[in-house]
Image (cartoon, grey):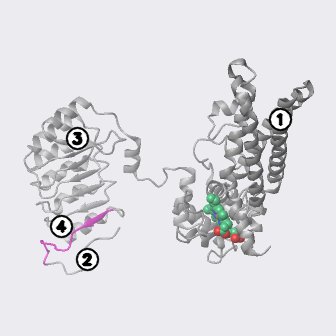
Amino acid sequence: MDQSAADIVIFFGRFHPLILHLPIGFLVLAFLMAFLSRKERFAYLRPAVGFVLLLGAISALVTATLGLMLARSGDYSEDLLFIHQWAGLILVILAFSSWFLYRQKEKKSTDKIQKAYWASLFVMMVFLAGAGHYGGSLTHGSTYLTQYMPNGLRALAGLPAQEKGPKLIKDLNEADVFADIVHPILEMRCNSCHNASKKKGDLQMHTRTALMKGGENGPVFVAGNVQESELIRRIHLPDIDDDHMPPKGKTQLSPDQITLLEWWIDKGAPFDKKVAEVQVNDEVNAILRTLADPDANKTEVEKLLASGTALADPEKIKAYKSRGISIKPLSNKENWLQVTLYKNDPVNEVLGELAEDFPEQITWLDLKDTPLSDAGMEHIAKFKNLTRLRAEKTGITDKGMSYLKELPYLEFLNIYGTSVGDEGIQYLQNSPNLRRLYVWESRVSKNGAARLQESSSQLEVNLGFEVTVVDSLTVEVLPVAVGN
Ligand code: HEC
């Protein structure tokens, strides 16, 4: 058969999964009607049973024909396909024979014909269920139905309990690069189409032999050569490209998962090596650490926010809101609070009250452009979980800054346009989590900023483009935004 004829066959074949619902519907309905019509109340159904059976038989024949066409695509595992095909063909025969026996029985209802009719109907239902089940396993994999089964039901069905979330690696150095790191990624994102029973592109990935064998165009990776590896090439194609893997609409690989696959191929695609035996760079190392501990790369602040806090009294929040004070959750899933105060709010006093009511929950404070003064800063020291403070263009001074040294989680601080100077920012020397500090148009000098910068490699002090206070005696040139 030439290529275009083969394509037409598969084109029609793809209607199989659509059409197959007709025979299922008709045959189940015919069975139900035949069964019910034995009762006097439903006797009126009996004359129609033959018609519905015939519809079922014809649609089963059409479905089976389309199924045989689809099977030519070669995307399916032979063993399951064999069972499914034969179950389907026998079903067609049983559907026609049930219809035939129904007609005989209506003409001349002997005991023998009655028995044969009912036997045919029952066996037909068994084959309908069997063909359906194996067909489902072909398209969705044999674990499709049980994958999301609750553990209680799994136990009843004799299946092992489902793991919650990805399995964590206990000892990273001892972990097997392929079995523990690479294979679980393929399993999660590729196996639904490249597995024991389904081999799209003639490619299976469920075992290492299958993976090494490759697909219809040969091997899918070249050990030690990421660029030449078809598997990686396809992952990096744009989503809309037909060759992109996993295909559009399916859950995509994360950047971390891609990095790990590339790392594996780059290091020669080992199948029997431990992590300790394979070279690891910083980027890969950071990702690997998350396989043992999902929080490994989280900052202290991220961990704090993820760990949550107690729910603030909703009545108290309401009372603040009715006074026009903007207080709301950081997100609708969290108890953390963010507060924004404005020019006309009595800022220092309100902060005093808030520190009484929500010392734990307030983590973001936006006080820019308000009459905040050092007296208010004293209250701010009581928000132990404060991570972000905007105090730009306020009346705070070096003295006010001294209160901030009490805040262990402060990560972001903006004091642009205040009269805070070098002395003030030195109070931040021991703020372990401070990442960003904005000091432009304050009295902080380049030298002062550089001195603070030395205390932490994670800290970025931003002096802005214009520095209004320039120490005229400074001759050395310092970078404006001091690096990460
Ligand atoms: C939804 C189904 C589906 C998923 C999921 C899927 N693929 Fe595919 N894959 C296909 C189909 C269909 C083909 C064949 C058509 C083609 O060549 O584009 C194919 C072909 C391939 C081929 C080419 C084989 C050859 O020799 O021509 C590679 C390589 C591949 N897939 C890799 C992957 C990887 C890696 C993943 C997981 C990250 C993945 N696929 C996930 C459906 C899928």
Q: Is residue 484 left or right of residue 54?
A: left
Q: Would you say residue 470 sits in the magenta stretch?
A: yes
Evaluate whether residue 216 shows in this view: no
Q: Which residues are magenta?
A: 459-472
Amino acid, disc 1:
Arg
Provide the residue designation for mark 2.
478
Task: Report whether the residue tagged 3 is closer than 8 Å to ligand 1.
Answer: no
Q: From what the image shows, is residue 85 above or below residue 221?
A: above
Q: CA distance from mark 2 to mark 1?
A: 99 Å
Mark 3 — residue? 382
Ligand 1's quadrant: bottom right
Q: If you read the primary sequence from the N terminus, does the residue marked by circle 4 or circle 1 appear first?
A: 1
- Measured Cα–Cα span from mark 4 to mark 1: 94 Å
Of pointers 3 and 4, the one earlier in the residue sequence: 3
Which amino acid type is shown beneath numbered disc 2? Leu
Amino acid of disc 3: Lys
Quarter assignment of residue 417? bottom left
Tag 1 or tag 3, which sits nearer the N-term?
A: 1
Q: Nearer the viewer, residue 270 or 334?
A: 334
Earlier-in-chain disc, 4 versus 2: 4
Label 4 near ligand 1 (CB < 8 Å): no
**Residue assigned mark 1:** 103
Q: Position of residue 194 (x, y in %)?
A: 70, 59
| Mark found first going from the N terminus, 3 or 2 | 3
- The reply to whether the C-beta atoms of the residues labelled 3 and 1 are less than 8 Å apart is no
